[in-house]
Image (cartoon, rainbow, N blue to C red):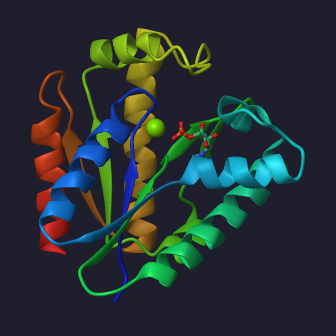
Amino acid sequence: MLKTVVVVGIPGVGKSTVLSIATKILTERGYTVKLVNFGDYMLNYLKKIGETEVRDQIRRLRLNTQLEAQEVAAKAIRRDLETVSRDKFIGIVDTHAVIKTSLGYWPGLPLVILKELRPSVIVVIEANPDEILARQLRDVGRYRKDLTSIELIRELLQINRYYAVASSVISGAALKFIQNSEGCVEKAAEEFVRVVEEL
Ligand code: AMP
Ligand code: MG
């Protein structure tokens, strides 16, 4: 059976770094891992229909367009994970529990999306607000002015928890919090690996 872990965390928390290290460890331990980024799938579709070429523009598009892209992405991810599913296979989806759109907070994992992704567990990566701010400022390839202030980061961390809890309840997936502290990214990755090994 296909085992899927959905991973959420606010921008700058270090999700991608933790996941790439965890993927390496899991592969060494005999797992076949497919790590997918939900935003990549949305962007692919949005490029195809001529809406945007830029990742950080997605959350600024009309909500209906985002909804459409979200559903297309979830279906495509499901299909891709099914295709490679085999023994000791693990699907990891790097995404968001909540998106701060121009209109307001919007769920990244509502029921329609969870029905496609069918996660066994939702992992929430968190970090210290000061470290998140520093990482966001270092990440010059991204346009995150709408997210970058210490007060907002604190608010996002809290809102992110509320939305992750809601997604856990409606999907029946377990919820696991992992702390990614500066200089201890390997520890966070190991903790993630242990979650997978428990599935
Ligand atoms: P990321 O590279 O993880 O920052 O994702 C890029 C963008 O993709 C985010 O800023 C969101 O606009 C969008 N995105 C990612 N996951 C989801 C989701 N589950 N639902 C809606 N939008 C998402
Ligand atoms: Mg990322």
Q: Position of residue 107 (x, y in %)?
A: 58, 50
The answer to whether 101 is drawn above or below residue 177 in the figure is: above
Residue drawn where x is 37% and y is 40% of the image:
16
Left or right placement of residue 117 versus residue 90 in this view? right
Of all residues, the one furthest to the right in this rendering is 50
Q: Position of residue 159 (x, y in %)?
A: 45, 36
* Quarter where residue 186 is shown: top left
Residue drawn where x is 42% and y is 11% of the image:
138
Left or right placement of residue 129 versus residue 56 in this view? left
Residue drawn where x is 12% and y is 66% of the image:
29
* In-front residue for pair 50/163: 50
- The quarter of the image holding the N terminus is bottom left
- Ligand 1, by image quadrant, is top right
Regarding residue 73, the answer to whether it shows in the image is yes
Regarding residue 107, the answer to whether it shows in the image is no
The answer to whether 75 is drawn above or below residue 52 in the figure is: below
Q: Position of residue 124 (x, y in %)?
A: 31, 47
* Quarter where residue 80 is shown: bottom right
Q: Position of residue 161 (x, y in %)?
A: 37, 43
* In-front residue for pair 164/15: 15
* In-front residue for pair 179/166: 179
- The quarter of the image holding the C terminus is bottom left
The answer to whether 180 is drawn above or below residue 72 in the figure is: above
